[in-house]
Image: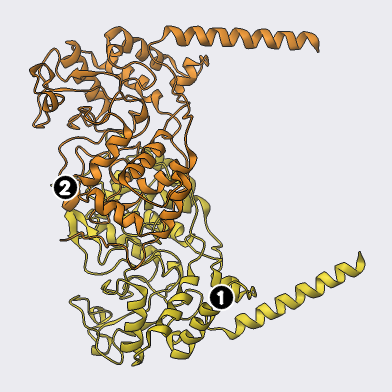
Chain colours: A yellow, B orange
Amino acid sequence: MKLSKTILSLVISATLSVSVTAMADEPIQPVQAASGINTAQAELGKKLFFDPRLSRSGFISCNSCHNLSMGGTDNLTTSIGHKWNQGPINSPTVLNSSLNIAQFWDGRAKDLKEQAGGPIANPGEMASNHEIAVKVLQSIPGYRKEFKAAFGTEQIDIDKVTQAIAEFEKTLKTPDSRFDQWLKGDKNALNQTELAGYQLFKETGCTACHYGEAVGGTSFQKMGLVQPYKTDNKALGVYALTKNEADRYKFKVPTLRNVELTYPYFHDGGAQTLSEAVSTMAKIQLGKDMPQDQVDKIVAFLKTLTGKQPQFTLPILPPSVDSTPRPEPFK
Amino acid sequence: MKLSKTILSLVISATLSVSVTAMADEPIQPVQAASGINTAQAELGKKLFFDPRLSRSGFISCNSCHNLSMGGTDNLTTSIGHKWNQGPINSPTVLNSSLNIAQFWDGRAKDLKEQAGGPIANPGEMASNHEIAVKVLQSIPGYRKEFKAAFGTEQIDIDKVTQAIAEFEKTLKTPDSRFDQWLKGDKNALNQTELAGYQLFKETGCTACHYGEAVGGTSFQKMGLVQPYKTDNKALGVYALTKNEADRYKFKVPTLRNVELTYPYFHDGGAQTLSEAVSTMAKIQLGKDMPQDQVDKIVAFLKTLTGKQPQFTLPILPPSVDSTPRPEPFK
């Protein structure tokens, strides 16, 4: 009994030591489970995230373009907004978005809370405004009760609305991908092709930008660093904010977590497949004509980054009452 | 010990006997939990119900207009379809829809399975067609696996698609409303106002059409039986199918289960509030100018028909692969 306990301890410390060493050597770290969440705010935020009454039409919710059934995206080249407006840019995934250095492709919102207010009031997206959105929520007894539980007051304002949505979004992490199992020491979690893909991913230089817990999301880079990127998309990146010529076409490096689910790729949704995306990146960012067999290996590796998707019960929304302002989808 | 057991038995039989008698006397029966469900088909159907890839745009799913967060409706006057098309009629709730005598307002689909194929191919709704929808699903390995589990074959066709959606929809029953608790013998489940409302509901004649497990859904009636119903809506009801003059403006009587959640009301969504709906119904169907205090009581009763909403984990959809036909939202 004593002996086997000792052996077990040795095995455990050996495993931990290998695992810690492995992780310390790698440019990518495992996704940590969400922590420090205010549960009442996050539960309220979940309802708000799914509530189309935050839009003018009563038809579009946060989940419309950041669909949690589909990797936190809409899988469209660019999104559909109010009155079928064609959005200017590809919807980034909301999964693991708390790890981003800033929000939106150009980083113009400093955090999830600031981001959440944007689409509600954007005429081409949800096309409401903060005043009406708050008025709608304030009229609904079920929401008043939940704001009271989450914030200690029934008095709703846009600050609390976006705070709750952000708190929910912080829960949307995707730990336990096969790659993370491998990182943590399970050497059977990846096959030889996937491992070879990871080696190529590092050797080719992809990890210069795609590193850390989110495998991206922590820096801004020019799209077309070595060769210009050809696109009809009009987005100028960080330049639109700074008017600094060096920021032209500079975008936030997207996370590669769950990239198998978040097609199509790039800020313009211009790459329909992972294979196309890897090949284009190699060429325009790193100046390499990557042979297809290498592309295939990297794609195999990238598919191991699909983590455990957030699992939760579909929220039931508190109903409007007679005094609730009604949606205006066709006005 | 023996005595208390006997007393307990007596109490139980007394309660049961009251309860059975009460139910037998009433025109409304409690919602029964769904039974005889093929679980593999229903689980697959749940994914299909939430999958916008069944639409041409990749943006509209069954859940868009029959939103299970909002009483199985979109809470819009009429629905929004492909390219923001304004639908011709109010989306009826999918909750308890298995109890309907037929589907759609005019009953043109004989059952849920037949209904499910309609919106997918309707140019003003999901705007796809059955061939493309099947091709999309057939290309997706995760779906092939689930069809194999549900139907014993990976060979997908529209018959299996609509069968699976219908099987999921059959699970969407809402038992255990306060009214059903009262029906089953819990005399404290309703307050005096609600009970008075139920008495008025019966005495006024509402139960001539709104009866049974779904409190409606089992007959067709002319909208405007006593006085013509004024609306700009162009729907002709059953007449559109039969060209029989007696069927003009004849629509399926909607269920009143969860009616607190399924605003706005009528086939044209013309009544924004329950109060307005009750008042209009009394006038045009029964020829009564109902005093507001009576309307209020009936509304109080109607709100006791909100049952336990279906609770399930938001489905995670299997991702498309390189060969999956892509959505065409703007073509």
- Residue plotted at (46% across, 58% down): A167
Q: Chain of mark 2?
A: B
SS label for mark 1: loop
- Residue plotted at (19% across, 20% down): B280
User: Would residue A234 appear left or right of B190 to someone viewing this image?
Assistant: left
Please tell me how crowded label 1 is: few (under 14), some (14-19), or many (20+) other residues with Cα within 10 Å.
few
Residue B16 is marked as none
Residue B123 is marked as 2
Residue A191 is marked as 1
Which residue type does callout 1 highlight?
Asn
The vertical placement of A192 against A1, above or below, is below
Residue nearer the viewer, A155 or A59: A59
Residue nearer the viewer, A260 or B314: A260
The vertical placement of B173 against A36, above or below, is above
Find residue A64 and report its horizontal and vertical position in percent. Answer: 31, 55
Find residue A298 and report its horizontal and vertical position in percent. Answer: 44, 80
Which residue type does callout 2 highlight?
Pro
